[in-house]
Structure formats: C-alpha cells, structure tokens
Amino acid sequence: MLVYWAIVVGLATLVVALLRRRNRTLTERLAAVIALAIYAFGQLAGDLDRTLDLPDILGLNGAIWTFAALVIAAMLVSRWKVTQSFVAVLGTLLLTTGVLSVVGGGDLISGGTARAATPDALELDAGNTPNVYWFILDGYGRGDVLEDHYGDTRQADFLQALKTRGFSVSSKAFAAYPMTYISVAATLAADYVAMEGDNIHEEDTFENLAQGGGWVLETFRSWGYSYLLWPGDGFNGTSCVGVEDTCLRPHSWVQEPERAILRMTPLASQIELTSPQEHFTRSDPIAVADAVLEVEENSPIFALIHLINPHPPHYQAGPECALQDVPFRLGAIYGVSEYVDSVRCLNSRLLKAVNRIVGSDEDAVIILQGDHGPSWSLAIHTDSLDKWNRRETVIRLGVLSAMRLPGGCAPPDTMSLPNTFRVVFDCLSTDDVPLLQNRTWIANQTPGDLREVDPID
C-alpha cells in the first residue's frame, strides 16, 4: 500500500501541485479527466479477458486505482476545507487498511475466505527429527502430463534419477487448486482452504495464511524446529515477513504490481532493477542448497524454498541451457519449447542441489513439488468456469510430487497436495495422521469462482 502511495498518489500530487501554480482551472479539469480515466482503468481491470495479452497495468486490482483516483481528485479540488479534511481522513483510512491487512491476517479488509481446520497437536517421535526441505517448483507439471502434452522433457530419466537418490514419486499427484496463492496455503494448512461459494478473488487472505504457516509450521515449531524461508521471486505469498527464523535471501520489494506501475513512469527504463542473472540465481536450486547448508542452527530445520522456475519467464534455453536476457514478467504464457527447456535445465540443477544436501545431511527429508502445472491456454483468467476443458484441467492440476522420506515411509501414489505434510508428520510422529480424501477444484481469478471436479488421475 505504501508503495502505491509513493508511486501513484505521490507523483501525481506533485505534478498537480506544480501545474496548479500556473493555471488552476485548467489543471483541475485535466486532473478530473485523469482521475476518471484511472477509475475506469480500475473497473476495467477486473473484467478484461487476459487472453487478449493486454499490458500488465490492466491486470492490477481495481481498488488500487480507485483509491488513487479518489485521493487525486480530492487534492485537486481542495479549495474547500471539507475536502482538505477528506484527504486527511482518506489517507489515514488507507494507511490503517494496509496495517490491518498485515497485522490482522487480511480477513477484515479483503472480505476473502480462507477456511482451514486446526488438527490436534501431534507427539514427536523422540530422536526422529530430520531436517525437512520443501521445494515449491512453480508451475512444475506431472511427468505423464509433460510427456503427453509438452513432448520430450526427458522426465523418465529425471524421475528415475530421483528414485536412485531415495525419492518416492507419486505418479498421480495433483494440486487441489490451480493458483499458487491458494495451493501453497492449502499445503501449509494440510487442509482444503476454499470451497465452492467462497471468495477467492482477494489473494491477501490466502497469502497471509501461507505466510503465517498454518498447522504445518505450528507443528514444526512445537517440535523445536527452526523455520528457514527462501522467498519466491515476485510472489508475495512466500515473502519474508518476520515469521521465519531465517530469511535465506533478501526479498525484493519490487513485485509484479509495482513493476507494472513503474512501467508508466519515467523510471520505465530502470524497471529491471535486477539482472536476468540475478533473477536466475533467485530461482536456482544450487544457490538454495549452498545458502541452506551455510545456516548454523542448534535445532532441526524446516526450510520452505519457493522457486519461480519453471514458471515464466524462462531464463534458460537450448542444449547448453544458455542464460536468456528476457524481462521479468510472471504473467507470460507458457510457451511449449521454452517450458520444455526450462524444465530440462531445472532438472539438472535440482539433481545437483539434492546431491549437495544429501552429501552434507544424509537423513534429510526432501520434497520436490509443483504448486500447480503449466497452462495450455489461459482458462484460469476467463470469466466463466465453463471455458475450462478436461485437457486444460489435467495439465494445470497434475503436478510433480517426489518425496525423500525416512525408511519405511512412502507417499500414496495418488495424492492431493494438502496431504503432503500429513504424510511427513505420519512418518515423524508417534500419532497416526489420517489423510484427507483427494479433492480438487478448477477456478478463475476474476470473479473468483470455484468448482469442484473429479481428481486428476
């Protein structure tokens, strides 16, 4: 919220203040048109079909632009005392809203719904406290899905290499939800956090649940684990916000919405504040392994590692996995050849990262999972769930899930992601941890509808 104030309201107010000194009437009329245009953009953003590949700015939350328009309009006609007071009140309200959305978990402000049961506390099996590394690989689809729909990704060789390193691969794993912010929240809650009829349009509610860690983090903490976090580049839901004991790398304040706003300013040429090499490093499993192994903790660790790879933008391509100079844009479409290269290049580095971790920590529990699969089309951005077809559903919801667990433990072959840590806790606890019934939903981001569908087998 403060970033939007500084960039949108702050710059606009400064320009208006300078112009008013020269021609107050003309400036106010011009500003009124600008304010209405901004408001119209905000309203339009919620309804546009993103398959039109419109500029990023049209994908922003309409509330941002509505607030900005009101503030600018009020400042322009501030010849009346009552309007001046309105500006102060509105400013205080916006600032309070931002603070409450962080402190209060977002429910009060967003109006969203995130439901999750709180299971009973679990008793740790004394002495059974391996370090746990959870790699969230954004947009990593299931092996059979990639082979059937994306061609030769050499997945069979990769999955076999994982098995030789002690991993069990669930051949029929799937995400419960098709969007990162709900999928990650559900896995950390070890429960289904949204049902048909719930409001999923406001992402903050689910991102706050993910950042708070839910039942999974509560359980690890009750067992004396330290929480390490490698934040996802450009994604707020796995940001370092102080809940973690160790943030494994600084988190950039320049998220995708901020970049979209910056593109409209004279700073446009400086938007890529980090180079492709730095973006690549932020999603490099080898860099993660090195960072995690350097941390000195006197307790076992739970490391949440969110890598944007193989989600666009795709920074590696070709047989040599050469680094590509491409702009950072999370909304880019999954191109078939680019995605295949991204998966293949990531696989090589994942195996090296696993080797480094296991070489230093032979009892490590390691989880490699996609939060959702790629998109064959953009059904997730359409206004009607009827535009989803079975092919898109299978591609988007079928995910990689490979788990390296203590001896005698193995995940089910068919598994929905919210069962992930139920499987882990069943291995580490003296209690029996029941698995949830496998369920899954299709959804769209606007207007935020959910529909339950048959599990992706």
Image (tube, grey):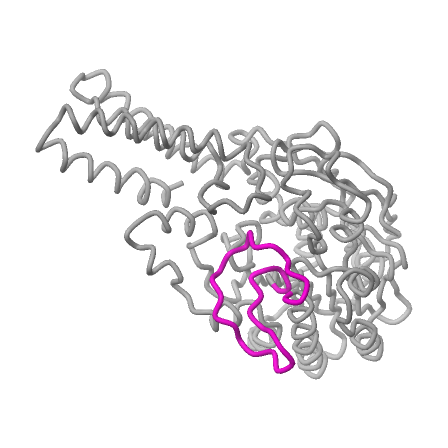
Q: Residue at x 60, y 74 (%)?
A: 317
Total label count?
0
Q: Is residue 326 magenta?
A: yes
Closer to the camera in the image, 50 or 439: 50
Closer to the camera in the image, 169 or 450: 450
- Which x, y percent locates residue 446? 60, 34
Q: Quadrant of residue 201?
A: top right
Q: Residue at x 66, y 46 (%)?
A: 378
Compared with 235, 205 (above or below) is above
Compared with 73, 114 (above or below) is below
The image quadrant where one finds the N terminus is top left
Compared with 269, 182 (above or below) is above
Compared with 396, 306 (above or below) is below
Q: Residue at x 74, y 73 (%)?
A: 364
Closer to the camera in the image, 282 or 410: 282
Q: Residue at x 55, y 74 (%)?
A: 291
**Magenta region: which residues?**
309-338
Q: Is residue 305 magenta?
A: no
- Which x, y percent locates residue 351? 71, 78
Compared across the picture, whether 87 is left or right of 52 comes to left
- Secondary structure mostly seen in magenta is loop
- Which x, y percent locates residue 344? 69, 73
- Which x, y percent locates residue 244? 55, 57
Compared across the picture, whether 17 is left or right of 439 comes to left
Compared across the picture, whether 10 is left or right of 396 comes to left
Query: Which residue ends up furthest to the left in the rendered image?
Result: 22
